[in-house]
Image (cartoon, rainbow, N blue to C red):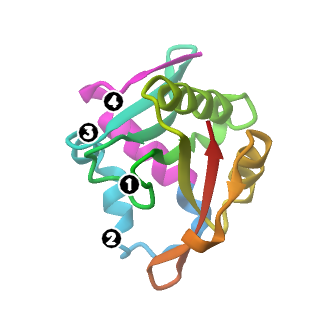
Amino acid sequence: MIIRPVRPSEHARVGELLVAAYAPSGMPPEVPYWSALRDTAARTRDAEVWVAELDGAVVGTVTWAGHGSGQREIAREDEAEFRMLAVDPTAQGRGVGQALLAAVAERARQDGYAALVLCSATWMAPAHRLYARAGFDRIPERDWTPVPGVDLLAYRKAL
């Protein structure tokens, strides 16, 4: 498996992958977040979008939001943040999410952050188990609701 920056020719694929992975959310189609998920090009303007490539196919993605990124939502000054970690439903269970998570943790360490944080929707139980196995702790004081009906749980891992 290769973890690398997304290529412009893969922007649409990453958007499709995110929509497929987030489909179980039950969000109605008119919610603007679907457009945000599809707009990979916009995210690359103020964050780093990475992909997981397996057997020549893009099967996962994550958005790295370092200092200065408009994608940061809950990170404090000494914390790195990532968003939109997703695995194609057809590739789940093959270690893709774990590999993406390891890549962002390594980047956070290299950049000298004290911790790594993220938010995850309440319905994302498999992701919550992944984060717990990787040593993330819940930080409920930073849970939030960006729009009605979308409740986000906050997690943190000390590095």
The span shown in magenta is 1-21
Judging from the image, what secondary structure is the residue with disc 2 in?
loop
Q: Residue at x 22, y 47 (%)?
A: 42
Q: Position of residue 59 (x, y in %)?
A: 54, 31
Is tag 1's residue or tag 4's residue first in the polypeptide sequence?
4
Residue 15 within the segment the image draws in magenta: yes
Q: Nearer the viewer, residue 159 or 95?
A: 159
- Residue, disc 3: 44
Query: Badge 1, how many Cα within 10 Å: few under 14, some, many 20+?
Result: some
Mark 2 vs 4, N-terminal side? 4
Q: Marks 1 and 2, Cα distance to the nearest angstrom? A: 9 Å
Which is more N-terminal, label 1 or label 3?
Answer: 1
Element at badge 3? helix
For this orientation, the residue located farthest to the bottom is: 148
Mark 4, other Cα within 10 Å: few <14 / some 14–19 / many ≥20: some
Question: Looking at the magenta stretch, what is its main secondary structure?
Answer: helix
Kind of residue indicated by mark 1? Leu
Q: CA distance from mark 1 to mark 4?
A: 14 Å
Residues at badges 3 and 1 in contact (C-beta under 8 Å)? no
Q: Are the residues tagged 4 and 3 within 8 Å (C-beta)?
A: no
User: The residue under label 3 is which amino acid type?
Assistant: Thr
